[in-house]
Amino acid sequence: MRIGVVAVQGAFLEHEKMLKELGADCVEIRQKKDLEGIDGFIFPGGESTVQGKLLKELDLFDPIQKAIFNGMPVLATCAGLILLAEHLEQDSTTHLQTLPVTVKRNGYGRQLGSFKAYGTVDDMKNVPLVFIRAPYITEVKKEVKILSYYENRIVAVQYKNQIGLSFHPEMTKDTRIHEAFLKLVKSGKN
Amino acid sequence: MNNTQYELNKGLAQMLKGGVIMDVTTPEQAIIAQEAGACAVMALERIPADIRAAGGVSRMSDPKMIKGIQEAVSIPVMAKCRIGHFVEAQILEAIEIDYIDESEVLSPADDIYHIDKTNFKVPFVCGARDLGEALRRISEGASMIRTKGEPGTGDVVQAVRHMRKMNGEIRKVCALSKDELFEEAKKLQVPYELLSYVHENGKLPVVNFAAGGVATPADAALMMQLGAEGVFVGSGVFKSGNPKKRASAIVQAVTNYKDAKLIAKLSEDLGEAMVGINPSEIKIIMEERGK
């Protein structure tokens, strides 16, 4: 299994470390040529404005968008969730728009609003949730599965091949979400 | 600051990795920086080159000016306070700045003590010239480090020197045997626990950016190849002929810092770079501030 970790900016090394721990191969996506032979994508945390701009400038935007629409599994955390969102609250600069949800950027405010909590994600209990200048999801289309709420706000969803999270599993030692993602990639391969 | 908050603060620095943090003095410049792909902006009244030119005492910026920039952009906003000036830091925390730079670019307010950054919830970045300075700042509560370089000169030589020195010292610490760390901690004047972390992990316990004198895409890529995890660009962007284009080129060069062909293309037609001055031509050596 070969996972392409989008490495234009942000905390991509943390995801790679976790994937390697779980025995998956990963490759850093910085240019179009890096996309060959990929079985799944990870969109890391970072700054969505920077990442979105670089995807376009480095000619990654169209091939990635097409691959996701064609069913390539993707795990997106924080800024990554913003990149996938179909709509952004009070913001017209959307990006890949593959995930039919509306996301509120900096939903919890500035850095002083960042926090860590524990919650249930799908059938996983007591998952550490690290929110750093995090977004949350305000609206989902009917076919989107809500994986997690935190204090009545949607913070994790799945839509077919796409998993979107407000928080950062890669900043913890808990590998369950990455394992679930790898399972999704594997099931797509069979 | 409790442990969780410190982890969150280190975490924000991790989110900035592979990015460029730009000095801006107005909301308009902040918007240009954000559109060019800055991962954060540093709000200050005067960029280092102008601080040099103006001379005198340089202080924290007007909170109103910083708030104007916070309203203009959605990316994180940083601001500088003077070394040791914990009240300036309290003010910056009160206006909910995302990161405080306790910076040698401003005139130091205390010539012995740095701010006890563990008393704050807001994160701090500090400058360092070597491993000793870096670990001392971290023990005081800094959750991000940058090289000092020599700000406002457009000359990258000091940033290179500081990055090489720090990484050379890290390699040396890795090569020591465990029982030699106690003596090394004494020599470097740093806590044993932090040195032990460096020994085991081969890196600082926090993110390390390059800063001071970066003026071109090539400078930025040079710092990345030397091991920086991201780059601060101070005077280099808005003291140049075409800030928008240069800023955008530096951002792309940091992402693809090993791709010389792409950096060659990015370096074309950028217009005038900031003129720059050599360290031998300047009177104020900012890197000497705060050890």
Image (spheres, rainbow, N blue to C red):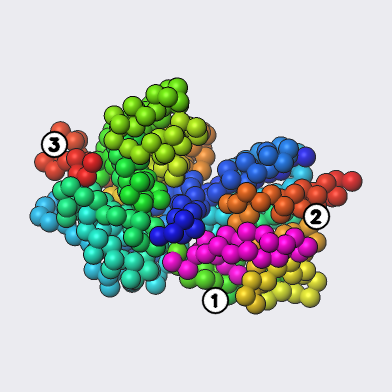
Q: Residue at x 26, y 37 (%)?
A: B155
Picture coordinates of residue A157, whole percent (x, y): 72, 66
Chain that bears disc 3: B
- Tag 1, which secondary structure? loop
Q: Is residue A54 left or right of residue A157?
A: left
Picture quarter containing residue A3?
top right
Q: Residue at x 53, y 54 (%)?
A: A46
**Mark linked to residue A90:** 1
Magenta stretch: residue B55 in it? no
Same-chain check, marks 2 and 1: yes
The type of residue carrying mark 3 is Glu
The type of residue carrying mark 1 is Gln
Residue B68 at least partly seen: yes
Residue position marked by numbered label 3 in the rendering: B281
Q: Residue at x 68, y 76 (%)?
A: A139
Segment tinted magenta in the rendering: A112-137
